[in-house]
Image (cartoon, rainbow, N blue to C red):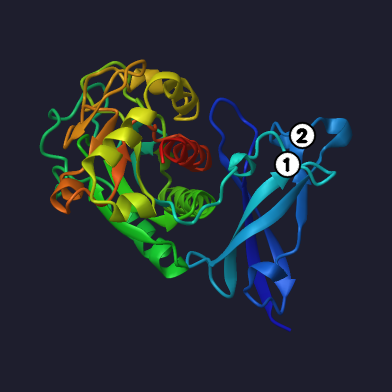
Amino acid sequence: MANSKLEYIWLDGYKPTQTLRGKTLIKKDFSGKLEDCPMWSFDGSSTEQAEGGASDCLLKPVGCYKDPGRAGDSYIVMTEVLNADGSAHESNGRAMIEDQDADFWFGFEQEYFIWDPETNLPLGFPLGGYPPPQGPYYCSVGAKNAFGRDIVERHLEMCLEAGIEIGGINGEVAAGQWEFQGFAKGAALAGDEMWIARYFLERCAEEEGLAINWHPKPLGPTDWNGSGMHANFSNGLMRECGDQATFEKICQAFDGDRIKPHVAVYGADNDKRLTGLHETQSIDKFSYGVSDRGASIRIPIGTVEDGWKGRLEDRRPASNADPYKVAAQIVKTVKSAC
């Protein structure tokens, strides 16, 4: 009988930013199908999700993917956390999705820094100082400007081999900063695959003794850009309507009373990034505009050139935001306008 390695991953209960956890289950003659992944459990008292006197939390499988980073018949199993009675745990962002409408498409642009835990600096930053200012690092090539490409390339290959839809990768504006773009249909699947992609990235960095920094402004109040997880989104109406007024109505629905619910789930310490500088709008303001990277929502020029058909980009979500919660809020707001 063949043994398969199933790595169950989940989000812990740490606040204000949850982190990924994982443990391995060995299963004989595993089919590779989600329906054959058993429910499992873990010690929630070790992850800020339970008290020691009643520590069992459940792991409900919601996605199963091949694990290219592990030898043999290996899988990544994305799970959501349940209480012992089967109800959704309060830390379960996936359970907050009220509408699973697969007509909504999401493309998350995930920025991050590759971080050296020994120096506590991004790759490319010298001890006690800074590299040359921003400018040469964006989409760069060459050892003077591109730092950590081996990790980035390894991550891309793992995602593609696993069946995670990645639209591309590029170096970002700061030294040691990179981005990958994910795509999925439906809020739940978009969140599942973004978290799995983040997990793969953490493992790629771990193999090199490095870390991934998801903080939206890890270099503090400096002139270096922060990191976001820009959320591109559309539904069938947006992809087909051909009407500028419809797009403006949707953008306007994100203003007013809807600002706070969105900002509340757009990531911890996002106020340090959304200052109105470095291609951001201020966290307490809202704006939209064609090709405007300083707006809350950018209307891509491609949407306009295609006759007002396509997507919008919410530029506010931080790099550490929970994609489940971001997508859930976007679906709710867009549907209120349509």
Q: In the picture, which quadrant includes the C terminus?
A: top left
Q: Nearer the viewer, residue 130 or 109?
A: 109
Q: Residue at x 41, y 43 (%)?
A: 210
Which is more N-terminal, label 2 or label 1? 2
Q: Residue at x 77, y 50 (%)?
A: 41
Secondary structure found at label 2: helix
94 shown above or below 336: below
Q: Residue at x 29, y 56 (%)?
A: 240
Secondary structure found at label 1: loop
Q: Amino acid at mark 2?
A: Ser
Badge 2: residue crowd in 10 Å (few <14, some 14–19, many ≥20): some
192 shown above or below 172: below
Please give left or right for residue 11 compared with residue 277 in the image: right
166 shown above or below 124: below
Which residue bears the numbered disc 1?
88
Badge 1: residue crowd in 10 Å (few <14, some 14–19, many ≥20): some
Q: Residue at x 66, y 73 (%)?
A: 4
| Residue reaching furthest to the right | 53
> x, y (%) of residue 293?
20, 32
> x, y (%) of residue 200?
46, 54
- Res. 176 visible in picture: no
Please give left or right for residue 4 compared with residue 190 in the image: right
- Res. 121 visible in picture: yes
Q: Nearer the viewer, residue 280 or 196?
A: 280
Q: In the picture, which quadrant includes the N terminus?
A: bottom right
Q: Amino acid at mark 1?
A: Ala
